[in-house]
Image (cartoon, helix red, strand yellow):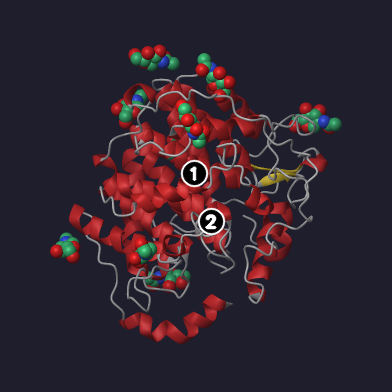
């Protein structure tokens, strides 16, 4: 509602505003464009100004904790692709601020909005830091890959065979709504992190879990035979009825995990087939209309204007992981470059919003700024456009190619992970209604939060008719 009102009052101005100019054939132009978009994204972040324990590392409400981890991941890509180090100090401080007492991204202050998927988005960032040989942490005694391994070890202990023959639950804590839901993003992220850790470390344990989590997603029906990735399933029903809503980021996460394993297995036909399959299935996420060939969109909510703050950012991960796949599975390069080059041009055109003339919108196929602004919209444009530089970037490294920190002299053993059924002292709450994350005055925000919860809990089609 906030967005629509803003659109109504500012639509006229949008027509007149400048736009992010982008010449996709010029590296300078791409860098200039991404620098403007990254600056716009980070203007939502106050932790670099206020510098207090509760604001460092995290975006203010209504953004959830996970999206900050996602944003820092996009800034690692930004630095890697453009070479611009301006934000590195801010990014490093942010990533290290959320390690938690056990250096595994279990953060007591965020118990009410930390599920397996939320934690994993911080893991994508630390894994990416490891693979990019980003300067190693200077607090604590863990390297980026060890932080990721610590995180992974908390998740593997949550693999739950009490229903559905396995899988991770969405939520970690019983007091959060979604504890009875096993979703693709939690399990897909675990699959992808397992694949990347396998490739980075060469440790077979990670490969075994990558295979096991992939097989589980397929066996339980969350990956279809034509590589569509459905949202999740209710484990009180033994996952017998998958919620078939399809989000861009789920397919993207599986695509990249498969591409990494294609690479790690030196081009096995099994992982080639799967990589190609997920790539084929991304056709769902492009070309919504005849006038919008190759333009990316979020089919489940964008055409009907029901996306919430989480969902506005999903296209960022589709772009991130598609571009990344071109390095791990070069046979995907031509198809991905075609799709994302056309999407980049459209995204740049949407970045013409007030008041700075370069604020990005959501509907890239509108051909102009649409009035829907926010962190997710900035991040989506950023990941799409900066990836145009991917072919000049150093591919993800592995442990033999980077110098890790010296092994801690204290102990490499992580403290025991929290038991999923622990009795928490926190007041039971619905995720999304926690007072910390949301200005309570924004009634619409609360409604939107309830909506995503219903979507993610399998009620989406009842609410929106958005199921595809
Ligand atoms: C990029 O930005 C710099 C500094 O503002 C400017 O000098 C240069 O002309 C721009 N290059 C392109 C290709 O837009
Ligand atoms: C914080 O980040 C914003 C966005 O990049 C920037 O405009 C501002 O100058 C930064 N503030 C400090 C104190 O670094
Ligand atoms: C890291 O290890 C050193 C000794 O190797 C120790 O002095 C220091 O306290 C450790 N720091 C943390 C945060 O554990
Ligand atoms: C639950 O589903 C799994 C496969 O997803 C199946 O192996 C198992 O037998 C089912 N259990 C019950 C009690 O139906
Ligand atoms: C492989 O990784 C697992 C999980 O982190 C760990 O427990 C195990 O010690 C590792 N094995 C080796 C040989 O490093
Ligand atoms: C892939 O190739 C490398 C280098 O030749 C080799 O060390 C490794 O064992 C191969 N991996 C597989 C799964 O074949
Ligand atoms: C694995 O990735 C590297 C780095 O991009 C690339 O050179 C190599 O060709 C890839 N391997 C396969 C089998 O495609
Ligand atoms: C991907 O699409 C191509 C072209 O339609 C088709 O030939 C191929 O069989 C598909 N591959 C997979 C794995 O679905
Ligand atoms: C393309 O068509 C859609 C649906 O009719 C419309 O919403 C959109 O504004 C059009 N885009 C352009 C650039 O005309």
Q: Earlier in the sequence, mark 1 or mark 2?
A: 2
Q: Quadrant of the C terminus?
A: bottom right
Regarding residue 274, the answer to whether it shows in the image is no
Where is residue 279 shown, x and y percent of the image?
A: 45, 40
Quarter of the image holding residue 31?
Answer: bottom left
**Residue behind mark 2:** 53
Q: CA distance from mark 1 to mark 2?
A: 33 Å
Q: Residue at x 33, y 68 (%)?
A: 349
Q: Secondary structure at mark 1?
A: helix
In this rendering, is residue 309 above or below 253? below
Where is residue 7 shown, x and y percent of the image?
A: 48, 80
Quarter of the image holding residue 54?
Answer: bottom right
In the image, 330 versus 400, the foreground residue is 400
Mark 1 crowd level (few <14, some 14–19, many ≥20, 10 Å Cα): many
**Residue behind mark 1:** 252
Regarding residue 227, the answer to whether it shows in the image is yes
Q: Residue at x 57, y 62 (%)?
A: 301
For residue 143, which numbered disc appears in the image? none
Q: Quadrant of the N terminus?
A: bottom right
Mark 2 and mark 1 in contact (Cβ < 8 Å)?
A: no
Q: Secondary structure at mark 2?
A: loop
Where is residue 183 shown, x and y percent of the image?
A: 66, 43
Q: Residue at x 71, y 64 (%)?
A: 463
Question: Image check: 67 left or right of 182?
Answer: left
Question: Image check: 229 left or right of 36?
Answer: right
Mark 2 crowd level (few <14, some 14–19, many ≥20, 10 Å Cα): few
Give the quarter the ligand 4 occupies: top right
Q: Nearer the viewer, mark 1 or mark 2?
A: 2
């Amino acid at each position: 509602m906030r967005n629509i009102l803003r659109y109504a009052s500012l639509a006229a101005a949008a027509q007149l505003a400048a736009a992010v100019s982008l010449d996709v054939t010029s590296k300078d132009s791409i860098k200039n464009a991404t620098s403007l978009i990254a600056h716009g994204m980070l203007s939502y972040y106050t932790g670099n100004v206020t510098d207090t324990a509760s604001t460092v590392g995290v975006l203010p409400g209504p953004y959830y904790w996970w999206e900050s981890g996602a944003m820092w991941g996009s800034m690692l890509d930004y630095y890697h692709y453009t070479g611009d180090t301006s934000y590195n100090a801010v990014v490093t401080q942010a990533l290290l601020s959320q390690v938690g007492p056990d250096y595994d991204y279990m953060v007591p202050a965020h118990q009410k909005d930390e599920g397996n998927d939320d934690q994993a988005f911080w893991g994508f960032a630390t894994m990416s830091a490891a693979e990019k040989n980003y300067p190693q942490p200077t607090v604590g005694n863990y390297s980026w890959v060890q932080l990721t391994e610590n995180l992974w070890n908390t998740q593997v202990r949550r693999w739950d065979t009490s229903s559905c023959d396995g899988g991770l639950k969405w939520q970690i804590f019983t007091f959060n709504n979604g504890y009875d839901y096993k979703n693709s993003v939690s399990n897909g992220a675990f699959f992808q992190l397992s694949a990347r850790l396998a490739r980075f470390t060469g440790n077979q344990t990670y490969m075994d879990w990558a295979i096991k989590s992939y097989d589980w997603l397929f066996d339980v029906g969350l990956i279809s035979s034509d590589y569509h990735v459905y949202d999740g399933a209710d484990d009180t029903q033994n996952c017998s009825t998958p919620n078939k809503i399809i989000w861009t980021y789920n397919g993207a996460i599986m695509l990249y995990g498969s591409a990494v394993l294609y690479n790690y297995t030196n081009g096995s036909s099994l992982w080639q087939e799967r990589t190609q399959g997920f790539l084929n299935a991304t056709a769902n996420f492009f070309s919504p209309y005849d006038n919008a060939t190759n333009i990316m969109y979020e089919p489940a909510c964008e055409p009907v204007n029901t996306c919430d703050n989480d969902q506005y950012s999903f296209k960022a991960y589709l772009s991130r992981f598609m571009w990344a796949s071109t390095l791990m599975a070069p046979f995907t390069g031509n198809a991905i470059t075609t799709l994302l080059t056309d999407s980049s041009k459209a995204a740049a055109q949407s970045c013409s919003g007030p008041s700075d003339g370069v604020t990005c919108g959501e509907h890239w196929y509108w051909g102009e700024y649409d009035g829907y602004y926010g962190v997710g919209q900035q991040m989506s444009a950023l990941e799409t456009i900066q990836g145009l530089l991917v072919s000049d970037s150093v591919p993800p490294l592995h442990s033999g190619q980077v110098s890790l920190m010296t092994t801690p002299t204290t102990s490499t053993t992580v403290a025991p992970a929290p038991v999923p059924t622990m009795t928490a002292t926190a007041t039971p709450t619905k995720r999304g209604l926690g007072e910390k994350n949301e200005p309570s005055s924004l009634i619409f925000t609360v409604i939107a939060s309830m909506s995503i919860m219903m979507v993610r809990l399998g009620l989406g089609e009842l609410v929106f008719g958005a199921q595809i």
